[in-house]
Image (cartoon, grey):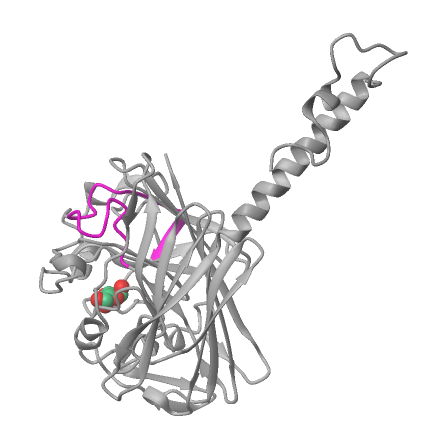
Amino acid sequence: MSAAPGREPEQLYGSSGSSRSSGPYVTLSSVVAAAISLLILTGCGAREERQAMLAYQQEPYGTTGDGAPVQLYTLSNANGVRVAITNYGGIVTRLLVPDRDGNLGDVVLGYDSLSDYLTASPYFGAIVGRHGNRIAKGRFTLDGVEYRLATNDGANHLHGGLKGFDKVVWDAEPYRAEDEVGLRLSYVSEDGEEGYPGRLAVTVTYALTNSDELRIEYRAETDKPTAVNLTHHSYFNLAGHASGDILGHELMINADQFTPVDEGLIPTGELRDVTGTPLDFRSATAIGARIDEDDEQLRFGGGYDHNWVLNDYDGSLRLVARGHEPTSGRVMEVSTMEPGMQFYSGNFLDGSNVGKGGAPYQHRAGFCLETQHFPDSPNHPEFPSTVLRPGEVYESTTIYRFFVR
Ligand code: GLA
């Protein structure tokens, strides 16, 4: 792997007593050239080796209530990072990343078995759609027609309704490509499903790269005008899923504004400056530093449960957030093409969801960074639009990248 094939090292570097008239003819430039080709060959070998270490495994993961068989796919990269994803809800069930000592830890909340996901899951690790977050009173009007959606959050529609994309079985196809291994999930949401107009063909691709990124690519097409807003709902705890609350994590969100909400967590329509509020995360701040301040927005959310208006939105991918857990050294950076991000601090967790290895997930045991268009967009023409029309393609990418510090 490290020596140039077909040559002995002494030939490369010359033997003692060599001269211009006898023995191998060695000049400085030939030594430099040989060294460069050695480096290139070494680099190529290492790269091929890293490529060969990208792998996936597939195993049965049980059956849904309707008897549909479900699989669990485990993707692994050259650094030992592993992500397990089931095609039920596109749920990320495990995500193992190293801490600063190289020890792998599972940094997402979740369950050990499918039956727990089927029974009661607060969207742990799931793909959320057709329209993520809340739609007020489950209603919106598009091209003069009012649509009524399933309501599942008091009077409101939340995360796609009673049976959103987090609760359906997706077709799944694992793949290996250059520097990444992935899982392509596809699902067709029928016209009228959960009240939405249009037959929507959706593809969500999860890719684990050799740069320790979990990249999620969303794509959808419709046959009638509809509203689409897809996101991913992992609850992260960078110290490990069973290590207590996330209040010590330091978080940076690159956003000058947020969308304030009413008591029902529906945006009022205002874009409010974060300056001087506990929602200013432009400089990295511990999640717990201000979470219990006497602030109306924090009261409404029971903590953080708001949409940030991400800076520099132009439809291209840019870095929008960074979470850092000081004891493990793990860092997670989020890049997205989306205009908004819901930062939810796990306020509804109360210990009743008993997760992997029997861990009861207590209040604020995980946090979500849900990249998205703003909540209730279909009822706010002033927000970036979530309307998708026939002939258009909905495409969006979000990357969660892991490293240590
Ligand atoms: C989102 C919402 C929260 C809550 C969680 C799931 O983050 O904004 O209010 O519904 O999902 O429990």
Q: Is residue 262 visible?
A: no
Of helix, strand and loop, which mostly describes the magenta segment?
loop
Given residues 39 and 284, the one toward you in this image is 39
- Residue drawn at 31 percent across, 36 percent down: 329
Q: Which part of the image, by quadrant, shows the C terminus?
A: top left
Given residues 248 and 25, the one toward you in this image is 25
Residue 228 vertical placement versus 257 (above, below): below
Q: Which residue of the protein is positioned furthest toward the right in this rendering? A: 21
- Quarter of the rendered structure image containing ligand 1: bottom left
Residue 211 vertical placement versus 6 (above, below): below
User: Looking at the rendering, which quadrant does residue 369 occupy?
Assistant: bottom left
Which span of residues is magenta-colored?
235-258
x, y percent for residue 6: 73, 35
The answer to whether residue 246 is magenta is: yes
- Residue drawn at 48 percent across, 75 percent down: 203
The answer to whether residue 40 is magenta is: no
x, y percent for residue 383: 43, 68
x, y percent for residue 24: 82, 19
User: Looking at the rendering, which quadrant does residue 330 occupy?
Assistant: top left
- Residue drawn at 36 percent across, 58 percent down: 83
Task: State how many labels appear.
Answer: 0
Judge left or right: residue 29 versus residue 124: right
Q: Which part of the image, by quadrant, shows the N terminus?
A: top right
User: Looking at the rendering, which quadrant does residue 57 occupy?
Assistant: bottom left
x, y percent for residue 102: 34, 38
- Residue drawn at 20 percent across, 58 percent down: 346
Q: Is residue 380 visible?
A: yes
Given residues 192 and 219, the one toward you in this image is 219
Residue 194 vertical placement versus 295 (above, below): below
Judge left or right: residue 90 versus residue 46: left
